[in-house]
Amino acid sequence: MKHLIDPTDLSVKEIDNIINLALNIIDNPDKYSEACKRKKLATLFFEPSTRTRLSFEAAMIELGGNVLGFSSADSSSATKGESVGDTVQVVGCYADIIAMRHPKEGAPMLASMVSPVPIINAGDGGHNHPTQTLTDLLTIKREKGNLSGFTIGLCGDLKFGRTVHSLIKALSRYENIKFILISPKELKVPDYIITEVFEKNNIEYREVTTMEEVMSELDIIYMTRVQKERFFNEADYVRLKDTYILDKSKLKDAKDTLSIMHPLPRVNEISTELDSDPRACYFRQALNGKYVRMALILTLLGVNV
């Protein structure tokens, strides 16, 4: 039985197979409409979620399966002191597969050690969010046609952003990708990413402090929110916050083929004036999350169509 806890749980071949399956689902939705008939997905969300929970539920419904679960710890027996391990073993009696989000890092890993059914990590604290990474990879594949040979700018909170860390680790396994890291010095990518990913694998990267200085080079810009709460000093936040808001003026040197991505939710880091720009693909990205989760559910359940 296979679980998905960390993006590196999947080989490059397995990732490619999931992405190709998602592309086939997009092209042939009717073929998969009853693939999970009589199968049940449990969504155990111990903290709030919009896109991740609803996309998992939509994915299972579109595969012809059913969904059960809860959307906050307040509506589960966790409020009575039940452990994650006990919850998962009980829910595994009722469901065929579990998608779990938990505020504590490592909780889905612990759950996978006792679960009678496959566990999908739907986010554990600031640690991992592997299905967002699969969503990002499917989006890049659909927007660019491949997963190699491009320059990506990662912008905003690169220190605490789990989506950024997971995406860097995943893309580092593909060929000829150049990374440009755009952030204030206070929110630079952690040192372990530099040493264990970029330098260890001899991957080209550059660190800069403004998006304008590199915009003309980018094939993809992946935006994240610069969070006020991450700064020790409000004056620094006020000084930097507008630097990392993407608007029309900052795109004046951008390629016509640029793809603008964001894992969402957005606050103000991408101006709404860009929503009608064909290069903005963050809402298409959210839709891709449903398709890639459909493919992942089929893969982990071993369903062949």
Image (spheres, grey):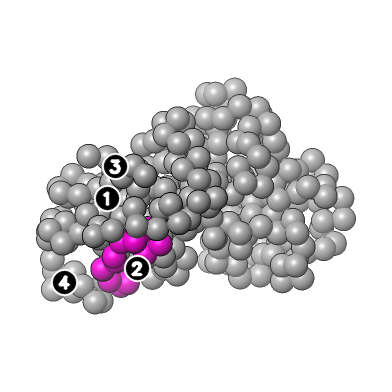
Residue 47 image label = 2
Left-right relation of 11 to 94: right
For disc 1, the neighbor class at 10 Å (few under 14, some 14 to 19, many from 20) is: many
Q: Which of marks 4 and 3 is nearer the N terminus?
A: 4
At mark 4, the secondary structure is helix
Q: Residue at x 47, y 65 (%)?
A: 51
At mark 1, the secondary structure is strand
Q: How far apart in space, not on screen, are marks 2 and 4 (Cα)?
A: 14 Å
The reply to whether callout 2 and callout 3 are in contact (CB within 8 Å) is no
Left-right relation of 81 to 303: left
Q: In this view, does 292 lie above or below 76?
A: above
For the C terminus, the quadrant is: top left
Q: Measuring from the top left, give residue 118's x and y in whole percent.
A: 25, 48
Q: How far apart in space, not on screen, are marks 4 and 1 (Cα)?
A: 19 Å
From where the camera sits, is residue 242 visible? Answer: no
At mark 3, the secondary structure is loop
Q: Which of marks 1 and 3 is in front?
A: 3
For disc 3, the neighbor class at 10 Å (few under 14, some 14 to 19, many from 20) is: few
Residue 119 image label = 1
The three-letter code of the residue at mark 1 reads Ile
Magenta range is 61-72
Q: In this view, does 49 lie above or below 134?
A: below
Q: Measuring from the top left, give residue 176's x and y in whole percent.
A: 65, 27
Q: Which of marks 4 and 1 is in front?
A: 1
Q: Residue at x 54, y 23 (%)?
A: 201
